[in-house]
Amino acid sequence: MNRRYDIDWIRVIAIGLLLIYHTAISFQSWGMMLGFITSDQPWESLWIPMAMLNVWRIPLLFFVSGMGVYFAIHNKNWKQLIKERATRILIPFVFGIFIVVPIQVCIAQFYFKQNLSYVPNPAHLWFLGNIFLYVLLLSPILFYLKKNENGKLVSTIKKILSSPFGLLIVIGAFIAEVLLVDPLLYELYAMTWHGFFLGLLAFFFGFCFVLIGGSFWKMLLKWRWLFITAAISLFVFRSSQPQMKVSNVQLVIESNCWIFSVFAFGHKYLNHSNKALRYLSQAAYPAYIMHIIFLFIASIIIFPLNIDFHLKYVLTLLFTIAGCFVFYEFVIRRINFMRMLFGLKREMKYKSLDLERSEKLKSQGVSNLI
């Protein structure tokens, strides 16, 4: 099975956007209501690009997660898949609730001079809990589709979704979700029924997009300029409205147009590998888990400085990124126990050394009894 490097790149970029977005929250006057340490000098105009990202950055990650499961179930049964996902998702999720999130909460409470206290909650890691539930709920359907790729049902799905008109069904499913759930805010995904069902749909359709194969991606490439034009036009219209208020239906259409554009242009320009991707694809997940801790530390250090608030944003972002990657490089990456807690596969180099030693002993007539 060929590796889809464009999907790897999109995942890395999406997590990079998450770091940029969360740093931007620290420069919004309402950031404190979300538990963020906020600057006394807000950068209000940052809300414009934030509002553009807000309607598609989280749904995009759900799509990518569904795509990842398609590749994960290759040569696996459902028990093996759930075991692997539990190792890669559930363990970091539980570790985050009881170790990572309490640390970031305590840092914020220290800054605000509050009494230290903590009620277990997933905070920004709610996404992992959703993904693991989707795997459990959808596994029977996903395995059926994968094992019957040449069957009538999959052939019908391929035929429908390989047409741009088939994407109307995808958009229609998301429209049905917002009409039925009627969320208070479309962009409020975390720990809401709206976020759960929207993520479930995106996860399933992401799986279907890679299941379909080349015909789907050729269609996206052919119509990519229509998708990006529609997305930009809908955002410009939204920006012209009082408080950027438009209907949830319009937000669904805009969101999906952005996502189709990202997949189309990503497939055209990012389907290649290099050293940077190999490193970042491993580092991105731990960075996602840890970044709030380093963001809060950066906020405490940088916000009191008597410098321009634009520079504060840049320094805060750079400190957060640097903290994540230093901790990844010198702690998570090098300690097998830490790798497991952050959803990475165990490093096999030590086992390889043992095997090499064993082969040498065997060549000398010594049997390895360990």
Image (cartoon, grey):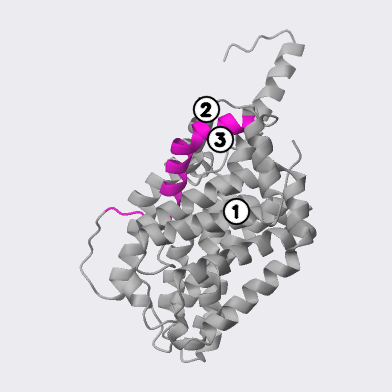
Q: Select label 2 or label 3 by which is in front.
A: 3
Report if residue 1 is visible in the image: yes
Would you call the spot at circle 3 few (<14 residues within 10 Å), some (14-19), or many (20 or more)? many
- Residue 45 lies in the magenta stretch: no
Residue 33 sits above or below residue 275 on the image: below
Q: Secondary structure at mark 3?
A: helix
Q: Which residue is mark 2?
A: 78
Report the span colored magenta: 120-146
Q: Nearer the viewer, residue 298 or 283?
A: 283
Q: Nearer the viewer, residue 324 or 266?
A: 266
Q: Nearer the viewer, residue 315 or 264?
A: 264
Q: Which residue is mark 1?
A: 283
The x and y percentages for residue 249 are 48, 68
| Cα distance in 3D space between marks 2 and 3 | 10 Å
| Cα distance in 3D space between marks 1 and 2 | 27 Å
Amino acid type for the residue under numbered disc 3? Leu
- Residue at image point 62% right, 44% down: 208
Report if residue 327 is visible in the image: no
Residue 115 sits above or below residue 314 on the image: above
Q: Which residue is mark 3?
A: 142
Give left or right: position of 182 versus 7: left
The x and y percentages for residue 70 are 62, 39
